[in-house]
Image (cartoon, grey):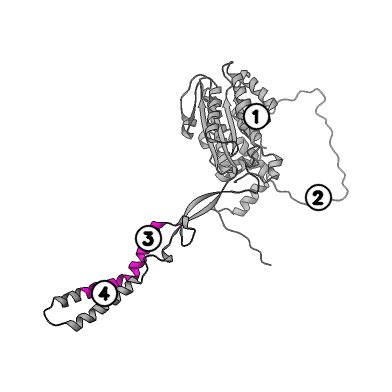
Amino acid sequence: MAHFIDRRLNSKGKSTVNRQRFLKRYKSQIKRAVSDAVGKRSVTDLETGEEISIPTRDISEPVFHTGKGGKRDVVHPGNDQFTAGDKINRPPSGRGQGAGEGDASDSGEGEDEFVFSISKDEYLDLLFEDLALPNLKKNQFDKVVQYETYRAGFQTDGVPSNLDIVRSLKGSVARRIALTGSDRKKLRELEAELQALKEDKHDNTLKIIELEKEVEALKAKIAKVPFIDTFDLRFKNYDRKPVPTSKAVMFCLMDVSGSMDQATKEMAKRFYILLYLFLTRTYENVEVVYIRHHTQAKEVDEHEFFYSQETGGTIVSSALKLMDEIVKARYDSSDWNIYAAQASDGDNWADDSPQCRDLLMNHLLPVTRYFAYIEITERQHQSLWREYQKVEDVMDNFVCKHIQQVSDIYPVFRELFRQSEQNAAAGGHYGS
């Protein structure tokens, strides 16, 4: 039996095998550090790597040593300095005690926390581990695969209805030129020579008869080449490629009204960037629809969604109405898994909040796999939250969550998209 040991080095001169073993061994500590790091990052650098610190006590190696054996007599000294109720003076400063949590050393030596860097891919893998789109279902039977027909060039045989006449004639012309080109050239030369002999005043009867026989033989040879042959026929070729039976679309609805201050918008953007990275990294063929709203809602592209400065009043129902129109126009619920994530500070006209509830109950949630509402505020919940809680009480595919500060974003995100045991047993993510 042969054993192969991979000692290849990565770009930084460290063993890739040892690195993966280290990440696996200290995964829980690293995941805690990654979770803490999310809240400290800005909107623009969520897709980079990270420096991870692990306390030295967590990476210490167990040591086996020989203990003291035999019978020992130990005398423990009693307390001859203090009695109950005595007050102890604060230790004087400047004698080895510092402000840190570590222990002082009289030899000037000690150990800092172990710090190492993880790559962007390792960071994102840990960030989105065990997450999945809830209620994701295939829209067709499990064993049915849909195919899409597309043109795939030409072939030499096929049914008459697929015959490409122009391509076949081009092949015929090329074949006849290749087979008769030299004979036609010789025929032109003989005809020119024959014409010259006929115009000559001398008697060239025998030569003319001989040339006429050669000309007739060449013409007969050329005529034997058929105008079109089975080799020339070209038929249009069609092939089929499988297409996913499960397609998903995520609607991102963000409140950009005047009540959303810059800090609140920043937290909403962080949530949506996490959502975008999760979708694009975990799934294929997931479309994202961005909707910004104040008193009016508008479908925008990714750049405008995150960086536009437009603002105004607040009518939340405008975003829900626009989403309903887009779903009906472009995303048939029988072919698409429809998801939505809405972020707002909860400020809305009191008369509009019941309308939002009706839109969700009667139009959106019946065709939506999962709808998550994120309220980002430190104030008391208002009418929109109360109406949405009524929806949450009766609809299983609707969830309300509250974010008060930046550190709440990632825990709430994981709670919203944590992979259920049923989905994990069924094989995890589709298209991943």
148 up-or-down from 177: above or below: above
Kindly identify the amino acid type of the residue bearing the numbered disc 2. Gly
Amino acid under disc 1: Phe
Which residue is disc 2 drawn over?
A: 67
Q: Answer with left or right where residue 93 lies relative to residue 326.
A: right
Q: Name the residue under label 3.
A: 169
Disc 3 from disc 2: Cα separation: 96 Å
Q: Are marks 3 and 2 in contact (CB under 8 Å)?
A: no
Q: Nearer the viewer, residue 240 or 294?
A: 240
| Residue at image point 53% right, 52% down | 240
Dot 4 amino acid type: Lys
Precedes in sequence: disc 1 or disc 4: 4
Q: Could you tell me which secondary element the residue under label 3 belongs to?
A: helix
Q: Kindly identify which residue carries mark 1.
A: 398
The CA span between labels 3 and 4 is 25 Å
Say whether disc 3 or disc 4 marks the residue closer to the N-terminus.
3
Of pointers 3 and 2, the one earlier in the residue sequence: 2
> How far, Cα to Cα, is label 1 from label 4?
86 Å
Q: Which of the numbered marks, if any, corresponds to residue 186?
A: 4
Residue 111 part of the magenta segment: no
Q: Give the range drawn in magenta.
A: 163-191
